[in-house]
Image: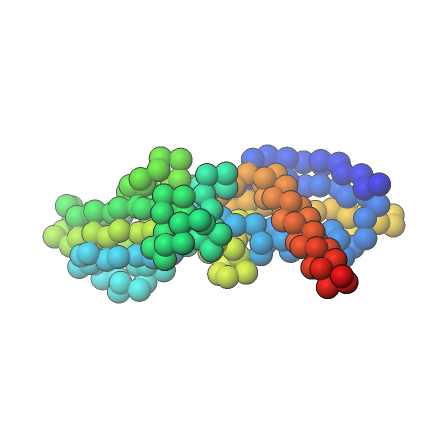
């Protein structure tokens, strides 16, 4: 029987002591936290106007790195969504609009200037600088966020840190997970375990199928 003790917890960080577990299992949970638990990130940007000093691609890249609050219950991974639409639907993508004009000598466009069509899916922080605009310069764009996995691109990694350290005694490990803010730290670990279980079940089912 595996014993789990919560050593420390805040919304953005959780430290668990795992007892009676093999290192490879504990490490599998850690790896799933990083690579398999989905989170939202901007993936597709349609630039309508950009007279800033940044190239369109750099602007799009910067938007992709903005951590977005994620709701895993209401959104599907595009590849698992039943819409089958390559452009996505309201269950697998969220539209953000940015429309900024440089009014002063130099003004800064922040993540908080992105207007989301879903008020629960929005940047984790409103104060991430995106681009500076001089007077008269403007940026107008539409950006689509979707769920993705860390194994695809780092921008979809829900955690900034996930470390496993050896504790005192045999089969004792400490797992520390720190969230980037898209999901609560505890939810990342819970989802990782759920996805690991699902994957093991799939192996079991296909083994069963190949035996008969
Ligand atoms: Zn869809």
Q: Please identify the quarter of the rendering in which residue 87 is found.
A: bottom left
Q: Residue furthest right?
A: 170
Q: Residue at x 32, y 41 (%)?
A: 116
Instruction: Find residue 63 and report its horizontal and vertical position in percent.
Output: 35, 54
Q: How many marks?
A: 0
Q: Residue at x 31, y 46 (%)?
A: 95
Q: Quadrant of the C terminus?
A: bottom right
Q: Residue at x 36, y 57 (%)?
A: 86
Instruction: Find residue 11 and report its horizontal and vertical position in percent.
Output: 56, 35
Q: Nearer the viewer, residue 150 or 16?
A: 150
Instruction: Find residue 206 and report its horizontal and vertical position in percent.
Output: 69, 59
Left or right of 128 on screen, residue 172: right
Q: Residue furthest left?
A: 136
Left or right of 65 on screen, residue 27: right
The answer to whether one can see residue 130 in this image is: no
Q: Please identify the quarter of the rendering in which residue 137 is found.
A: bottom left
Q: Quadrant of the N terminus?
A: top right
Q: Residue at x 44, y 53 (%)?
A: 78
Q: Residue furthest front?
A: 212
Q: Nearer the viewer, residue 95 or 33?
A: 95
Q: Is residue 121 above or below residue 51?
A: above
Left or right of 63 on screen, residue 20: right
Q: Nearer the viewer, residue 212 or 166?
A: 212
Instruction: Find residue 83 and report its horizontal and vertical position in percent.
Output: 40, 49
The answer to whether one can see residue 15 in this image is: yes
Left or right of 50 on screen, residue 121: right
Please name the colour scheme applied to the rendered image.
Answer: rainbow
């Amino acid at each position: 029987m595996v014993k789990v003790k919560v050593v420390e917890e805040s919304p953005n960080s959780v430290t668990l002591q795992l007892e009676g577990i093999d290192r490879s299992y504990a490490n599998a949970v850690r790896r799933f936290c990083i690579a398999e638990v989905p989170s939202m990130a901007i993936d597709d940007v349609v630039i309508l106007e950009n007279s800033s000093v940044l190239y369109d691609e750099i602007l799009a890249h910067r938007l992709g790195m903005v951590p977005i609050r994620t709701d895993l219950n209401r959104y599907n991974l595009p590849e698992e969504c039943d819409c089958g639409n390559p452009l996505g639907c309201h269950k697998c993508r969220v539209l953000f609009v940015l429309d900024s004009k440089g009014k002063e000598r130099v003004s800064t466009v922040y993540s908080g200037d992105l207007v989301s069509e879903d008020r629960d899916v929005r940047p984790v922080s409103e104060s991430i600088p995106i681009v500076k605009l001089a007077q008269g310069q403007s940026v107008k764009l539409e950006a689509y966020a979707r769920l993705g996995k860390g194994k695809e691109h780092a921008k979809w990694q829900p955690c900034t840190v996930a470390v496993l350290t050896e504790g005192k005694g045999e089969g004792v490990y400490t797992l520390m997970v720190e969230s980037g803010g898209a999901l609560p730290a505890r939810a990342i670990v819970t989802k990782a375990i759920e996805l690991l279980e699902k994957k093991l079940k799939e192996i079991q089912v296909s083994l069963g199928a190949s035996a008969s």
